[in-house]
Image (tube, rainbow, N blue to C red):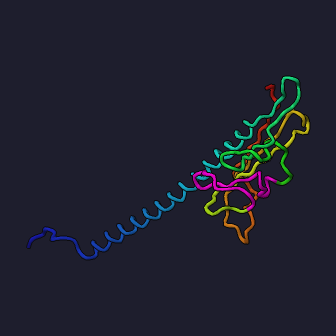
């Protein structure tokens, strides 16, 4: 009688196939979870950059004192358009609640890559971020210091056309002091 093995039994093949199938299914689920985590990380990384971009645009607007000591400011740039144009609010103080609600002139919408899509009270199709900003006067020195706030929020699927929740992913604040110029 020959004691050498002649091959695999049916049970061994079925067990190996079952182990292989479990491993492949686990890997597919892992790849799916990794893709979701990658998209979430992209949004969470992009949101602070979008807030910082708007804050720097606000900080770059003219707000100073001329050689004769008279204050001057940019009260016409519309940053809710891309690129910014005249006929806007510039550095005029914002109405109350602009960080909590979509107020034309103080809100814009961006897609998943941070590209500008539009402005105003209606969220455009494809928007993934809502960016709102506020210009206020510092109570301790209202003639010479502004408080600039920018929030970036995710766009939720609005139920009944309501705007996204006011809970911000990112909220940046900066001060702007009049300069000689």
Q: Position of residue 31 (x, y in %)?
A: 46, 60
In the image as oriented, which residue stretches furthest toward the bottom? 10
Q: Does residue 129 appear anywhere in the picture?
A: no
Identify the residue at image location x=66%, y=62%.
Answer: 124
In the image, is residue 141 above or below residue 102? above
Q: Does residue 116 appear anywhere in the picture?
A: yes
Which secondary structure is most common in the magenta stretch?
A: loop
Q: Quadrant of residue 76?
A: top right
Viewer-side residue, 151 vs 88: 88
Q: Is residue 136 highlighted in magenta?
A: no
Q: On the rendered structure, is 101 left or right of 142?
A: left
In the image, is residue 138 above or below residue 128? above
Q: Quadrant of residue 156?
A: bottom right
Q: Position of residue 51 (x, y in %)?
A: 69, 46
Identify the residue at image location x=72%, y=61%.
Answer: 164
In which quadrant will I find the N terminus? bottom left
Identify the residue at image location x=87%, y=33%.
Answer: 144
Q: Position of residue 84 (x, y in %)?
A: 69, 45
In the image as oriented, which residue stretches furthest toward the left? 1
Q: On the rendered structure, is 121 left or right of 97?
A: left
Q: Position of residue 65 (x, y in %)?
A: 84, 28
Q: On the rendered structure, is 128 left or right of 172?
A: left
In which quadrant will I find the C terminus? top right
In the image as oriented, which residue stretches furthest toward the top? 67
Q: Is residue 113 highlighted in magenta?
A: yes
Range covered by the magenta-colored residues: 98-121
């Amino acid at each position: 009688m020959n004691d050498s093995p002649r091959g695999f039994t049916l049970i061994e093949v079925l067990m190996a196939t079952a182990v292989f199938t479990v491993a492949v299914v686990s890997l597919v689920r892992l790849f799916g979870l990794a893709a979701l985590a990658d998209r979430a990380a992209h949004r969470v990384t992009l949101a602070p950059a979008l807030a910082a971009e708007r804050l720097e645009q606000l900080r770059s607007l003219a707000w100073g004192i001329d050689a004769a000591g008279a204050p001057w400011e940019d009260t016409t740039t519309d940053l809710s358009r891309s690129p910014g144009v005249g006929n806007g609010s510039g550095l005029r103080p914002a109405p109350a609640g602009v960080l909590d609600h979509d107020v034309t002139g103080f809100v814009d919408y961006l897609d998943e890559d941070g590209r500008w899509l539009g402005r105003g009270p209606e969220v455009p199709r494809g928007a993934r971020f809502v960016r709102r900003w506020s210009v206020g006067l510092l109570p301790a020195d209202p003639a010479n210091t502004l408080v600039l706030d920018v929030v970036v929020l995710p766009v939720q699927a609005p139920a009944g056309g309501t705007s996204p929740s006011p809970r911000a992913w990112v909220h940046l604040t900066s001060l702007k002091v009049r300069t000689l110029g």
